Image (cartoon, rainbow, N blue to C red):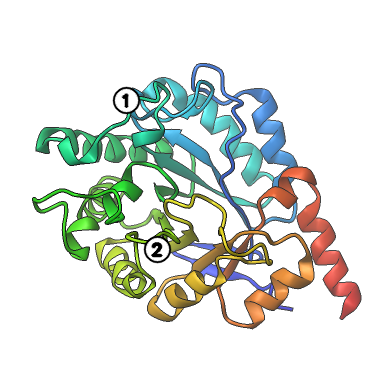
Amino acid sequence: MLIDEELKLKNITLRNRIVMPPMAREGSADGKVTENLIEYYRLRAECTGLIIVEHAYVSIEGKSTPKQLSMADDSVIESYRNLTEAIHKKNCFAIAQLNHGGKERISRDWININSMTKEDIEKVKEDFAKAAIRTKKAGFDGVEIHAAHEYLLTHFYSPYTNKRTDEYGGNLENRLRLANEIIQEVRASVGEDYIVAIRFGAYDYLEGGSKLEEIPFAVQSFIDSGVDLIDISGGLCRSRNPYSKEPGYFKELSKIAKESSSVPVILTGGVKKAKDAENLLKEGYCDLIGIGRAMLMDAEWSKKALKSLKNIQ
């Protein structure tokens, strides 16, 4: 079966194709990882290939919710070391996800990307780069840039929200510019031996929003800028496909991305059963399967899934 096959990713080898995607648990204390949160991830690391830890804000201006994790200053690093050690002890790898809330900030005051100055943009890039360095110091195996859902980088990518008239707005290359400049800054900061991923809100499912035919160009631009892993999700529609609830409901997007990509692609969305995960891999929609809510509900999902597929075969 494909789901238990190893996958080489940069300088590590995942033991299987199961990924726990980032899901916010609101379990921090002053932005730091708590013992309860460490236990939550430790339990789910059993038999899982890769965990992408829930989003952490890169600056206080980009904080989304009251108990969101932080990667905005060095004081949080030690608490993350305890988390990465717990995950690694289970023979699982860990990637940290970095985010700037943009519209979804804790104050709920909108950051209007169309009025952001060049200085504002430069600070966002610097904040991502500094936060990425902290993830490396904390013992993570890589870092993921959150460019999906209704957060800052999606607002730059989507023509529905991006009405800028400078080099950060207008055509597709310009709308991707900030994400690509952040990738480049992060890569320069963490070095070539560290995994850099992007969670890409590939499609808005919205008239006037991003287009399916833009995905290949976007994916190639991310790879050219330095990413090692593409994690597919929704754009302004957030983490749900408004037109489908089938297992792997973003599979149309991930298939386009995979056909355009020279790096592994993750598909997440509505996958609850092991046989559905296996079929999506077999049918070539992705290289890795993200199991979100099902793993949230059952810490032993990975163990049970692998066992059930072996029994079937």
What numbered label is drawn on residue 61?
1
Q: Nearer the viewer, residue 51 or 250?
A: 250
Q: Earlier in the sequence, mark 2 or mark 1?
A: 1
Of all residues shown, which one is farthest toward the front? 207
Classify the position of the C terminus by image quarter.
bottom right
Residue 84, quarter of picture = top right
Please name the residue shown 39% across and 75% down the image.
261
Please name the residue shown 41% across and 33% down the image.
104
The residue pinned by badge 2 equals: 228
Q: Position of residue 262 (x, y in %)?
A: 39, 76
Whether residue 109 is visible: yes
Q: Amino acid at mark 2?
A: Asp
- Counting the numbered discs, the total is 2
What numbered label is drawn on residue 9?
none
Q: Position of residue 8 (x, y in %)?
A: 52, 69
Q: Position of residue 113 (x, y in %)?
A: 23, 40
| For the residues bearing labels 2 and 1, Cβ distance under 8 angstroms | no
Lateral position of residue 93 relative to residue 310, left or right: left
Secondary structure beneath label 2 = loop
